[in-house]
Amino acid sequence: MEIFRDRIEAGRMLAKQLKRYAGRKDVIVLALPRGGVPVAFEVAKALNAPMDVFVVRKLGLPGDEELAMGAVASGGVRVLNEQVVKWHHVPQTAIDSVAKREQLELERRERAYRGERPMPELSNRTIILVDDGLATGTTMKAAVTALRSYKPARIIIAVPTAPQETCKEFEEQVDVIVCATTPQPFWAIAAWYEDFRQTTDEEVRSILDEAAAKPAA
């Protein structure tokens, strides 16, 4: 199984599997920050499509932070997993407390990444949602749920690497899922990159500034 040199190479390889969306006026590429941003930039360039970020913060269950009881996302969206909330008897005060904390971090990231630029129009668009890989897919699931509130025409998930079972789970949740590679055994996303250093807020801002300065023709 080939290992990606870095997120740039991964983005270019992923873009080859998305060629059918090139040059379409309805397409927008959204990245899950931070690691998804350099990948999405290569995809957007190859497809001649606009690009932005979609910031999502998982609402971890108090006492079991890995379990998502919901999420907050760009544009003031809050979604809850009612089953988790009900099953664990989470009081509204606890939900509000976690949501407030995560909303503050989301807003900090939005300011750091986008500055004064507004959220792009997403209704009736074909959204290609990009990350640098999927493991359990928890954050991506939260992003998809939140994106539905914007009433897009289609949601397409695109990642360079993910386990087969995770990709299969998403087949029923979105219109299309593109996993460029599905190595078995999977181990972890980082295992399939030579360079998997953390993408910084500054790098995200720089990439978004470049993307905004070169709108799709």
Image (spheres, helix red, strand yellow):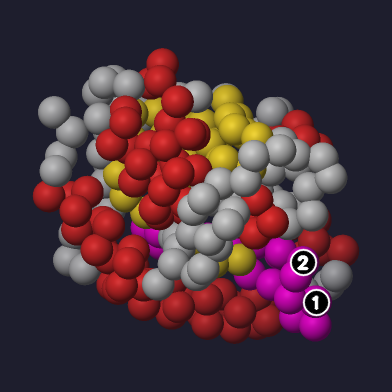
Q: Amino acid at mark 1?
A: Asp
Residue at which label 1 appears: 64
Per the image, label 2 sits on a secondary structure element best described as: strand
* Left/right of residue 57 with respect to residue 24 in the rendered view: right
**Residue 42 sits inside the magenta stretch:** no
Task: Indicate the quadrant containing the C terminus: top left, top right, bottom left or bottom right.
Answer: top left
Q: Residue at x 35, y 41 (%)?
A: 42
Q: Residue at x 65, y 82 (%)?
A: 93
How packed is label 2: few (under 14 Cα within 10 Å), some, or many (20 or more)? some
Alpha carbon of mark 2 to alpha carbon of mark 1: how far? 6 Å
Nearer to me, 110 or 43: 43
30 over 69 or under it: above or below: above
Residue 90 screen position, x and y as percent: 77, 74
Q: Amino acid at mark 2?
A: Leu
Q: Which residues are magenta?
A: 59-78
Whether pointer 2 and pointer 1 mark residues with C-beta atoms closer than 8 Å, the reply is yes
Residue at which label 2 appears: 67
